[in-house]
Image: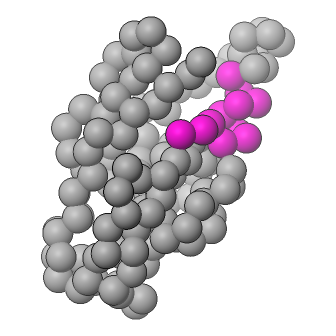
Amino acid sequence: MSFADYAENAVLDHVFNNTALTSPTTVYLQLHTADPTDTGTVGVSTITGNRPAIAFGSASGGVSTQSGTTSWASVAGASLPETISHYSIWDANTGGNCLATGAMDTSKLVSAGDDVDVSGITITLT
């Protein structure tokens, strides 16, 4: 997992330049078929539509882990089947700013009608 440029700059400015940082009320998960890069726009999965909310536990030791599961039921999409290999985390369910990106622990082939469940995403800052 890595912070996207938007989040990196916002945190650095907050810590070192006394720039206010407004935390998003909710963060959202987007799935990808390739590394989304820092923009979160590469390989966007066709199954996601609006991004569902994703929740994380309180950070400890520089680590925050997804709490619960984020799900899509009976997916449909123009390019199915497709293999989901990456994710991005956003501050809005459509549009918004990409906050972080990462690779799934295991890629998953998704076909029309499948349920997709994502859990265990861990964000680590070292």
**Residue 36 visible to an observer of this rendering:** yes
Residue 4 among those drawn in magenta: yes
Quarter of the rendering containing residue 3 = top right
Residue 63 among those drawn in magenta: no
Position of 50 relative to 59 (above/below)? below
Position of 7 relative to 114 (above/below)? above
Answer with left or right where residue 8 lies relative to residue 123: right
Give coordinates of residue 76: x percent, y percent: 28, 83
Quarter of the rendering containing residue 63 = top left
Give coordinates of residue 118: x percent, y percent: 27, 52
> Which residue is rendered at x = 33% and y = 47% of the image?
53
Q: Quadrant of the C terminus?
A: top right
> Which residue is rendered at x = 33% and y = 86% of the image?
81
Spot the residue most to the bottom: 78
Q: How many marks?
A: 0
Answer with left or right where residue 108 lies relative to residue 102: left
> Which residue is rendered at x = 40% and y = 10% of the image?
60
> Which residue is rendered at x = 40% and y = 15% of the image?
59
Position of 13 relative to 100 (above/below)? above
State whether the magenta stretch is mostly helix, strand or loop: helix
What range of the chain is rendered magenta? Answer: 1-11
Give coordinates of residue 48: x percent, y percent: 37, 69
Position of 14 relative to 22 (above/below)? above
**Residue 49 visible to an observer of this rendering:** no
Answer with left or right where residue 2 lies relative to residue 58: right
Give coordinates of residue 44: x percent, y percent: 52, 70
Residue 126 or 36: which is nearer the viewer? 126
